[in-house]
Amino acid sequence: MPSTRRASGPVPFEHWYTFAEGGPVDRALLPFPSAAPAPFEVARWSVAPGTSNDLDVHRSREVWVIVAGAGTLTWADRTTDVGAGDVVAFESQVPHQIRNDGPELLLAISVYWLQDGL
């Protein structure tokens, strides 16, 4: 049986960048070998009360899991309220952004991946 010690267990995060006004974004460094990488990447990020994350549009598909806080989500030409426990999915090339309307820090996890052929 092959060893899974290095490819299993807690995932370390490193600072990736900071939103213009919202807060920091940390990217996970997944422990899988380069010969068999995960088909996705993950990040965790926060948006301070009264601020927004940067408007985002990219080639990858993305899923957000809202861990704490609440805000107003805008994507394409739509808007809705989201809060802790909500999950949101974005197709490739769909602009999306969240504004933290609540009194506490909005925390989220992103899972993103490139669709084959994109």
Image (spheres, rainbow, N blue to C red):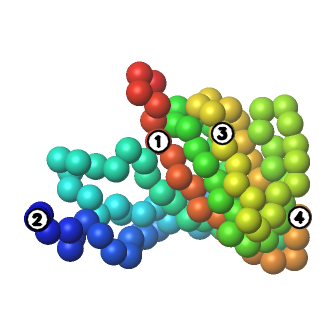
Q: Closer to the N terminus: mark 1 or mark 2? A: 2
The image quadrant where one finds the C terminus is top left
Seen from this angle, which residue lies furthest left?
1
Do the residues bearing badges 4 and 1 touch, measured as CB atoms within 8 Å?
no
How far separated are the C-alphas under marks 3 and 4? 21 Å
Question: Which of pointers 2 and 4 indicates the residue nearer the eye?
Answer: 2
Amino acid carrying label 1: it is Trp
Distance CA(mark 1)–CA(mark 2): 29 Å
Quadrant of the rendered image containing residue 33 = bottom left
Q: Give the Cα separation between the discs numbered 1 and 3.
A: 11 Å
The answer, for residue 78, to whether it is visible in the render is: yes
Q: Residue visible at 88% across and 70% down?
A: 102
* Residue 90, numbered label: 3
SS for tag 4? loop
Label 3 sits on a secondary structure element that is strand
Task: Tell me residue 25's x, y (percent).
Answer: 56, 63
* Quarter of the image where the N terminus is located: bottom left
From the viewer's perspective, tell me whether residue 1 is left or right of residue 116: left
| Mark 2 lies on residue | 1
Q: Which mark is residue 113?
A: 1
> Closer to the camera: disc 3 or disc 4?
3
Residue shown at the point (57%, 55%) measured from the top left: 110
Assess disc 3: are there few (<14), some (14-19) or many (≥20) residues with their C-alpha within 10 Å of its C-alpha: some
**Relative side of 64 to 118, left or right:** right
Q: CA distance from mark 2 to mark 3?
A: 38 Å
Residue placed under numbered mark 4 in the picture: 101
Residue in view at x 87 percent, y 76 percent: 103
Mark 2 / mark 4, whichever is N-terminal: 2
Q: Earlier in the sequence, mark 4 or mark 1?
A: 4
Tell me if mark 2 has few (under 14), some (14-19) or many (20+) residues whose alpha carbon lies within 10 angstroms of its own.
few
Label 4 sits on what residue type?
Asp
Decide which of tag 1 and tag 3 comes sooner along the chain.
Answer: 3
